[in-house]
Every structure is written in structure tokens, then in C-alpha cells.
Image (spheres, grey):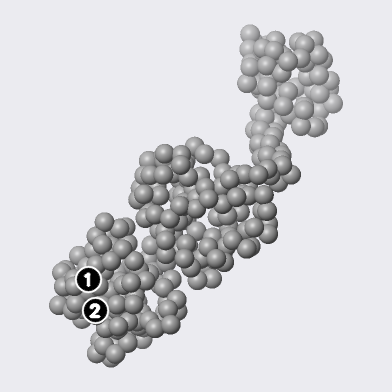
Amino acid sequence: MDFKALEYICAISEAKTISQAAKNLFISQPALSQFLSKLERELGTPIFDRSGNMMTLTSAGEILVRDGSKLLLSRNEMLHRVAELSDERAETLRFGVSPFYSKYYLPLLFPYYREHHPNIRLDIVEKNSLELEQLVLDGELDLCFIPAEPMREGLKYQPIYMEEIMIAIPPSHPLNTHAVSSPYGPYLDLELLRNKPFVELIPSLKFSIMCQRILRHFCLSPDVIYQSTSWDTVCMLVAQGVGVGFLPEVLIHKHLREPVFYHISGIDTTRTYSAVHAREKRLSHAALHLISVFQTLLGKG
């Protein structure tokens, strides 16, 4: 039995009559009737019950339609993928990423991706997470890579990496003597940060919102002495002893001079980094491969 036979059986099952199925398949009714009779003889069992006005599936027919539909779907998916690979035209892939990730990861991404997709032009937009989500919803971007949990209607969030929010302390700060060892690395009790000067991101950013949740959990109201839109700036100010601050673990070893990073005990501080695209949009092979490359880069840190 070939795919054509499965298509004919599924068409008859959906239409309920030979005449309507023949119209849907653009073949003659006698030809479809002859095909069905021949197939049932070959199988040695009826596929349809013809006793009523409508054709209903027999037990054998139900198996053929159920499993045959899966095979047809798999075949169509396979053909779609192959067609994309063999006919990858001069396509433009529009994606968004935060400026920080753009700075550290795009120089690694471009050479590799260009080698595998020489005909794909990458158009990149660098904005914060909330702005990028809106651009995807508006159809201005094919997808974006952001640290975000599923929140916006109409968007699909594909988790690709888990990162931890950590507390950063100046290298010479007395708090370093209070660090506690653990199998996962040193951690610090946030109660020790009460009344300590803080350097943080501006409150409107998603990272800052998560940090505020952590502070509320410990009933802390930090003494904020500096706010910035840049993680790099926060990192450098903490390293210089201006204050303490929350930073993502991906910043570890990204600066020549850097603060000391500690895990935070008593609360889950991980956040999900996701590839985000419109829920109704079918991603191309090039877009799916871009997600795979980003996942590899983030996993390596």
C-alpha cells in the first residue's frame, strides 16, 4: 500500500461518500470505487461499511485511517523540510536580541551560521525584551531571543537555556568572608545585604523586575545609589566597589576586572531564556537552525 492509497482512504473517510471524495480528489467516481474494491480484495477485509447512506469505517478501516493519517503528516513534513533545504533562496531572517547578548554572542554566531546558510541575510534588532516581544507580535520580526517566561498572548516561547541571577560583590568587600560553600558553588545570605548600597538596572526592565521579586522575598529595601540600562556598567561599578548588585551568571568571566559572583540561597533565582515567535507562524529551516545555534552558544556560556 502506497501513500496515494492512504490519501484516497482518508479522503473517503472524511467525505463519507464515494462521490464527494472523488470530487475532492479530482478523479472520477468509478475510478475511486474500483480502487477501493481492489484494495479491499488485496487486504482480504472491508475498509468501509456501505450498509447506510454514509460510508463508515470498519475496525480495519479505523486502523488504516488513524495510522495512515500520521504517516501522511510525517511525509508532508519531511517533504516540506527537504524543499526548504533544496530551495533556500536569498531569504532575510529578521530577529531581535538584547544588546548584551548581541555584544557577546553574535560575533560567534555569524561565521558559523554564514557557513551553513550563505544565502540567508540576517537583520538584527537590538532592544529590550518587552519591545522585542511587541515587534514579533506586529510582524516586524520573525523571532527574538529573550529571557522571558510565556506571558504574551499570540506568542510561542521555546525555552533554550536556563540562567541564574546571582549577587555580585566587590572583590575587596568584607561580605566575601561570609560566603558559604556548597556543591554548586559559594552562596551568600541576602540578609547580609541589608542597608548596603546597591547598583541596579532601571526598574522598567524585566531583569530588574525579577530582582525586585527577590528583594521582596527577603523583605529588603536596598539603598540604590546608581541605576543603569547596561549590565556591563553595573558589573564595572560593582567591581570598582561602588556597591553590590544583581547580575546574570552569563557575565562571569566576561570582564578583565570583575566582581565576585555568589549564588543566592532561600529562593529560586533561575530564569528561562527563550526563542519567541508568533504562535501562528511556521518557522523556516533557517530560523530553526538559528535557534539551535543560539542554544549551543548560550549553553557554552
Residue 239 left/right relative to 89: left
Determine the residue positioned at 34% across, 77% down.
236
Q: Which residue is mark 2?
A: 243
Question: What amino acid type should be assigned to the residue bearing mark 1?
Answer: Tyr
Residue 13 % position (x, y): 65, 21
Residue 45 left/right relative to 295: right
Query: In the picture, residue 115 is in which quadrant?
Result: bottom right
Tell me whether circle 2 and circle 1 mark residues in contact (CB < 8 Å).
yes
Give the vertical position of 125 relative to 188 (above or below). Answer: above
Q: Which residue is mark 1?
A: 226
Q: Quadrant of the N terminus?
A: top right
- How packed is label 2: few (under 14 Cα within 10 Å), some, or many (20 or more)? many
Give the vertical position of 247 relative to 127 (above or below). Answer: below
Residue nearest the viewer, comparing 164 with 202: 202
As helix, strand or loop, the secondary structure at mark 2 comes to loop
Query: In the picture, residue 148 is in which quadrant?
Result: bottom left
Residue 126 % position (x, y): 43, 55
- How packed is label 1: few (under 14 Cα within 10 Å), some, or many (20 or more)? some
Question: What amino acid type should be assigned to the residue bearing mark 2?
Answer: Gly
Spatial CA distance of label 2 from label 1 is 9 Å
